[in-house]
Every structure is written in C-alpha cells, then in structure tokens.
Amino acid sequence: MLHTQSDVVFVKGLEVKAVIGVYEWERAITQPLRIDIALETDIRKAAASDDVVDALNYKAVCDDVTDWCQSMQAQLIEYLAEAIAEKLLAGYPCTKVTLSIAKPTAIGAAEAVGVQITRHAVNHDDT
Ligand SMILES: Nc1nc2c(c(=O)[nH]1)N=C([C@H](O)[C@@H](O)CO)CN2
C-alpha cells in the first residue's frame, strides 16, 4: 500500500528518576533519565473528531513509560529502550517508534550519554 501521509505523536524530554546502571553504587540510588519518544501513528480520526479517545494519548504514554522505567530497574539503557519500544508498539496504535534515553548525570564531562533506537511494528498481513 502507498502511504501518502506520515504523522507523529511525540514526547520530548520526559524526565524520570529511576534505578539504572551497571555499577553497585548505581543500584543504591535513583538517577534522572531524559526520554524522547516519536510514535508514528495516523492522527486523522482525532483531528476530525477533536476527541481524545480517538487520539494516541501522550499523557498515557508518559505515565506508562515512567512506570516501566521505575519498575524495571534495568542495568543497561539498551535493555530499557528495547523493552519500552516493544511495549509501546504492543500497547498503542503506532507503526514505528523512535526512542532515545539519555543519562544526563552519568558522565561528568559529558552533557548526556545514551542510546537512540527505531523499531517497527510487525505487519501480520505480510506473513
Ligand atoms: N552502552 C552503554 N554503556 C554504558 C552503560 C549503558 O547503559 N550502556 N552504563 C554504564 C554505567 O551504568 C554508567 O552510566 C555509569 O557511569 C556505563 N556504560
């Protein structure tokens, strides 16, 4: 199918305090994570109805991502990013997720360190 439109619902700079890191001292504290998310989705129904029930609700995304970060207590941000992307694709009406997770306080000499990933929904029509 030819796609003639491309829409994104995004979250920029979501700050979450969570247990994250590989070192023993990191397991005893929380650190800030700064998260950017772009969810490729069709916004036309919400744009026509002006009703949040037709929208990919970014408030729900922020609440879910915050909960997942805090409950997972991951060591690597790679592990956390992959798990969040998988959950977003499974739980929200989106076809592609681009997600970056930064640790702004991990390396004193750097503004931030982190990862960025892009994942696509599996299209079951093709199988
Ligand atoms: N690619 C990664 N490298 C490192 C990570 C990580 O999650 N991914 N984590 C650490 C430590 O937890 C670090 O943040 C402590 O300063 C080191 N390298």
Image: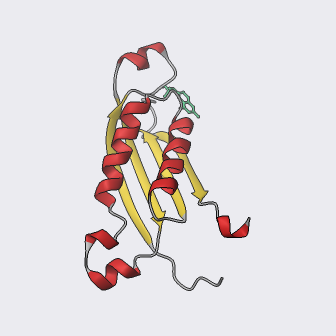
**In this view of the protein, which residue sits in the foreground, 15 or 126?**
126
Q: Quadrant of residue 82?
A: top right
Residue drawn where x is 33% and y is 77% of the image: 46
Residue drawn where x is 52% and y is 58% of the image: 97
Give coordinates of residue 116: x percent, y percent.
54, 49
Left or right: 21 as drawn, with respect to 14:
right
Give coordinates of residue 5: x percent, y percent.
52, 82
**In this view of the protein, which residue sits in the foreground, 96 or 110?**
96
Looking at this view, name the residue that lies furthest to the right.
127
28 in relation to 38, above or below: above
- Quarter placement of the C terminus: bottom right
Give coordinates of residue 2: x percent, y percent.
64, 84
Looking at this view, name the residue that lies furthest to the top.
24
Q: In this view of the protein, can residue 16 be seen by the observer? A: yes
Colour scheme shown: secondary structure
- Image mark count: 0
Give coordinates of residue 34: x percent, y percent.
38, 44
Q: Quadrant of residue 42?
A: bottom left
Residue drawn where x is 66% and y is 82% of the image: 1
Q: In this view of the protein, can residue 105 be seen by the observer? A: no
29 in relation to 81, above or below: above
Residue drawn where x is 56% and y is 86% of the image: 4
